[in-house]
Structure formats: structure tokens, C-alpha cells
Amino acid sequence: MVITPQANSKCLEMFMLGFLIRFIIEILFWPIPVGYDASTSYVLMCVCGKIDAKVLRAPLYPLLLMILSRLTGNALLTIKICSSIVSGFFMFSLAIWGQTIGISKSQLKGFCIAIYSFYVVMRLAWDLHRNLLAITFALLAISYRKSKLGRTIIFTILSIFSHPFAITIIGSAILADLLERHRESYILFGALLASIGAFLLVYSSHDPKFLYYIFSESWYISPQLLPIYILWLYAPTYPYVVKAWILIRNKMTSFKKILQRQMYYWIILSLIAAFMTKFSYRMVFMAAIPVAVMMFKVSVIKGNRRAVTYLIAYNIIISAIYPAFFYIFPVHPSFRRTHPPVLIGPNMFPNDGNNVIKMFRRALSMLHDNETIIVHYAEIAYAYIAGIPLCEDFIIITSSDSTFDEYLIIARSRGFHIAYIVWYINAPIGSVEAPLGGVLIAHEGNIGLFVYYLQDTFPTITY
């Protein structure tokens, strides 16, 4: 039977719930946007407005940020608004999609909250807004694929231009339908190929080495470490996996009732892409939604309404505890670079963040010709608040994975005589250290303002 999902009042309620959850969090942590990308690369997109390779890889969300930023005149407010809208839209898409996989209207709210609160999904919602928007459009595309082909084609195009990772979701639906010989799958397959072709045409015109980039060295987690990473990341799901196995063994349910064929393919395609492409751990994240669905289906099999409440409570507790455990005690040091210690909050503790802003303002007041301020990537939003002109040539911004030392060399090669760095005096676990040879000229708490004299031999100073 073909199920045509309805955008009913329950779906609109889910949109408002998703919007309010994120908006309240954003207000609580005002003025810094919640999430690493949200307070770094998205700020640069709003402020500088450059259509570069990073924007073209997933252009829809950055373009939305740039347009809205021109209207609001405030990059941070723009990001907070957009993150809340995407959060609401994601919950809306879950409600639409849930109707097509057997979730009843009475279960829909619990289903949406259970999926949203799953800690790997929250990791996506924390700052990977381009990915989340792509997932949203992809869920809508596969929801309407058997009833509203026009909508399906539009949502497919939007999903690929939101982020190409959506290929795994739409591809899994196409694969499932092809095996079941649904004629609609050929139309969806054509729409997917056309979307991918248009995306590659747009991107390769700017970067001819795009395909090389996709299959280049993996981000942080090597293929050899991926099996361990997958087992470690999804460890909190094991009680539900065991429960599913027991239920199936006792013939109380079946694999098909727990996860439809399309969701198996979704997981398989995501993991294959994780091993084959540069995107590694982020493709592992893409398998999170089917895993969360499995946990929900296992919870409701016996018709116990409290089981969903327990699942949501379990997800919230795990989302609060496991990321910190994952970050502080990683199986391998590279694991720490894929997951933040907290899923609610900006890059720094509020007091440290305020001190960073004070130190940047002091550095800016001291700046003269042939001098530069080196801003660490994690500090971009704080530097923006302090009034640092992020797009000017005399401001140097590190990459997200670099230490300060190489940027001191870059500053010297560009003819700067003095460089100012605002950073931790005693860096926390997992953070880079301030380079040796700096003079600590001011500090607030654990945040220092260091000056480096680039044309002289660096003095060795203990601070």
C-alpha cells in the first residue's frame, strides 16, 4: 500500500518543537552560536561572503546564511536564526517520513523526539547544519517518492545541493525500490543522477580536482581505525541491539518490522562510503538515523508507552555524558577530533570566552602597521564580537587542524614584524598550546595575550 504522508498539525507541531529546542539553547548561550562550525566557518561565510571551494561543496545553506546576514547585519544572529529553522525543519521531515515507515499518529511525537535526542543525531544538529539540511530534504524526497514524484524530484535536487552526503539516503531508497521493481524508482534514479551531474558541473568548474579530493586521505579516522571507531561511537546502543536480537530469537518480531529494507541499505551505503571516501567519520554519522529508528521500534514492540519515555530519557542522559567520556578517554587520539566534549554549548566556557573577547579588544587597540593578529579557528566568533576585521589582509586565521607555530612563520614571510595571539595560558585537554617564544603582556583568568617579535630571534620566556 502506498502511503502519502500528510503535513498535518502534528508535523507543524514538530517543526515548532524543533525550532524552539534550538532557539532556547541559542538564547541561553547568547551571543556565541552553539557548535564548532556554527561559530567558525559559518561566521566567515556571513562576514566575508566569499564563494569559495568550501561553500561550493554544499552551497545551499551557506548562500542562505549570506543572504540573511545581509538583511540582519549581524553574522551571529543570522546563524542562530538559521540553525533554529533547520532544527525545526528537520523535526518536520522526521514527522513526514515517520508516517511512511509505520509510525502511527499517536507515536509520532515520541518518535521525532527519540530520533532527535539520539546523541549521534545531536552531533549532526550541534554544528553540521549543511548535513542536517541535506538529510531533511532527503527524508522528504524518499517520503513522497511513491506518491508525489514532482515533490520528490525537487527535494532530491535540494538535498544534493545542500550536501552530497544525501546520496546515501536517496540511493538506499532507490536500491530498495529497484529490487522491489517499483517503476517510480527509475524516475528518482534519474533525478538523483541529474542532481549529482549538476552539482559536479558547478563544483568542478571551480575545482577541477574535486574527484581527487573526495577520494584523498581520510579525515582524522583512517580506514584501519574505522571498525574500532564505529564500535566505540555506537557502544551506547548495544543494550537495544541485544534486546532486538532477543525479540527476534523469541519470534516476537522480525528484522523487517524493526528496520525496513531501505534502512539496512542506508546503513550499508553510509559505511561503504566511510571506508572509500575522505569523509570517513562523518559518513559513519549518516548511519545514525536508522540506528535510532531501530532503538525506537524495539522500545514500542510490546506497546508499552513508558518505553518511549525511557528511551528519550536514556538518549538525553547519554547525550550529556558519553560525548565527554568519548572526548576525554578516546580509544585513539584521533577520535577526540571528531566529537565535542559537550553537545550543547559553544567552543569555550562562558568565562573563558568573555576573557578572549577582552584580550582581542586589547590586541586590536595596540595594533599598528606591519603588525598582525593571529586568530585561532576556534576563536572566530569571539574575535568577531571583539571587532576584529576578520576578512582584512592584516588578520591571519589558522585552519581548524593547525598549531599557531606554522602561522607565525607565515606572518614573518608576509613581512609582519609583530604578531599578537590570544590563547589559553594552560591549554585544556585536546587543545594546542601557545607557541614558545612569546611574551605574555596581559591576561584575564587563563586567557593570555601573547606578543611575538618576528624579525628577531624568539626569546625564550617562561609564562
Image (spheres, grey):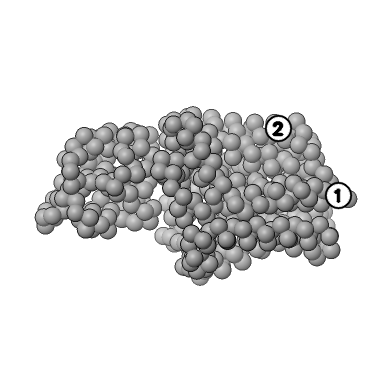
How packed mark 1 is, by other alpha carbons closer than 10 Å (few <14, some 14-19, many 20 or more), is few
Q: Picture quarter containing residue 448?
A: top left
Pointer 1: what residue?
Answer: 2
Q: Position of residue 220 (x, y in %)?
A: 45, 61
Name the one closer to the observer, 231 or 174.
174
**Which residue is at the far right?**
1
At mark 1, the secondary structure is loop
Q: Amino acid at mark 1?
A: Val
Q: Picture quarter containing residue 231?
A: bottom right
Task: Residue at 36%, 48% (x, y): give it.
Answer: 377
Pointer 2: what residue?
Answer: 12
Q: Position of residue 86 (x, y in %)?
A: 59, 40
Q: Is residue 221 left or right of residue 463?
A: right
Q: Is residue 306 left or right of residue 409?
A: right
Total marks shown come to: 2
Q: Position of residue 66 (x, y in %)?
A: 49, 40
Whether residue 231 is visible, yes or no, is: no
Task: Residue at 64%, 50% (x, y): give it.
Answer: 159
Q: Position of residue 211 (x, y in %)?
A: 53, 67
Task: Residue at 84%, 46% (x, y): give it.
Answer: 3
At mark 2, the secondary structure is helix
**CA separation in Å, label 1 and label 2:** 23 Å
**Which residue is at the far front?**
205
Task: Residue at 36%, 37% (x, y): give it.
Answer: 384
Q: Earlier in the sequence, mark 1 or mark 2?
A: 1
Whether residue 84 is visible, yes or no, is: yes
Q: Is residue 283 left or right of residue 72?
A: right
Residue 431: numbered disc: none
How packed mark 2 is, by other alpha carbons closer than 10 Å (few <14, some 14-19, many 20 or more), is some
Name the one closer to the observer, 330 or 216.
216
Q: Amino acid at mark 2?
A: Leu
